[in-house]
Amino acid sequence: MMNLRNWQIECVNQALYHYQVNSHFFCLATPGSGKTLMSAVLAKKLLDENLIDFVVCFSPSILTVASITSTFESTLQQRMHGKIGSVGCAITYQGMLNLTDDFWDILKTHRVFVVFDEIHHCAGNELSNSNAWGQTILEQIKGYAVFTLALSGTPWRSDSIPITLAEYTDPNGKLVCNYTYGLSQSINEGVCRKPNL
């Protein structure tokens, strides 16, 4: 397994501690910093400690689904294709809308760890202000998944609708992150990637 960066080790440990009292963890880490590997290592720890049965990852695109699947399979040393014998699957947010009741029932009958890559694509803290993906999360995942991990490198929405599963402070409405690895930290550590223009 690849060596972890300090922030990844800290985040995994903080999430494991946090999960003792709260089922949801929000990680803000700058783009390209290694959120997928961190989440795969966290999933491995949860599996090794027999705290979960399955892992389900949601992300915005087919390309990220392929990357997540590869990283998780390599880290967990188990298949992530969603078929018999696998430890879980990775699915796009679009694909989430086509899942059957049989799929969602797994969250009610087993201990499932759900990872949301770039969670800011999912809007709404209640059904009345949510987009289709946020509504599905509120109805089918919140309250059923044993643990959830929300990841974002850009945790805001241009429409100002709250990010699904996110907490905000009162009264100024600032996003509450359980762990933050910011751009300045990544630049200081030489992790920040040069943007492709």
Image (cartoon, rainbow, N blue to C red):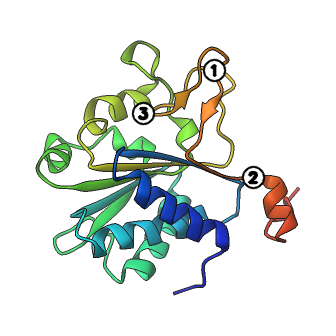
The image shows residue 57 at horizontal and vertical percentages of 40, 56
Horizontally, residue 107 falls left or right of residue 113, namely left
Q: Are marks 1 and 3 in contact (CB under 8 Å)?
A: no
SS class, disc 1: loop
Which quadrant holds the C terminus?
bottom right
Q: Nearer the viewer, residue 147 or 126?
A: 147
Q: Badge 3 local density, few (<14 within 10 Å), some, or many (20+)?
A: many
State the residue at coordinates (26%, 36%): 143
Callout 1 amino acid: Gly
Q: Residues within 10 Å of mark 2 (few under 14, many from 20)?
A: some
| Mark 2 / mark 1, whichever is N-terminal | 1
Other residues around mark 1 within 10 Å, as few (<14) / some (14–19) / many (≥20): few
The residue sitting at 54% across, 64% down in the picture is: 36
Q: CA distance from mark 2 to mark 1?
A: 19 Å
Q: Is residue 65 left or right of residue 77?
A: right
> Which residue does the numbered mark 3 point to in the structure image?
133
Q: Is residue 36 above or below residue 107?
A: below
Residue picked out by circle 1: 173
Q: Nearer the viewer, residue 52 or 70?
A: 52
Q: Residue at x 24, y 72 (%)?
A: 86
Separation of residues labelled 2 and 3 (CA atoms): 26 Å
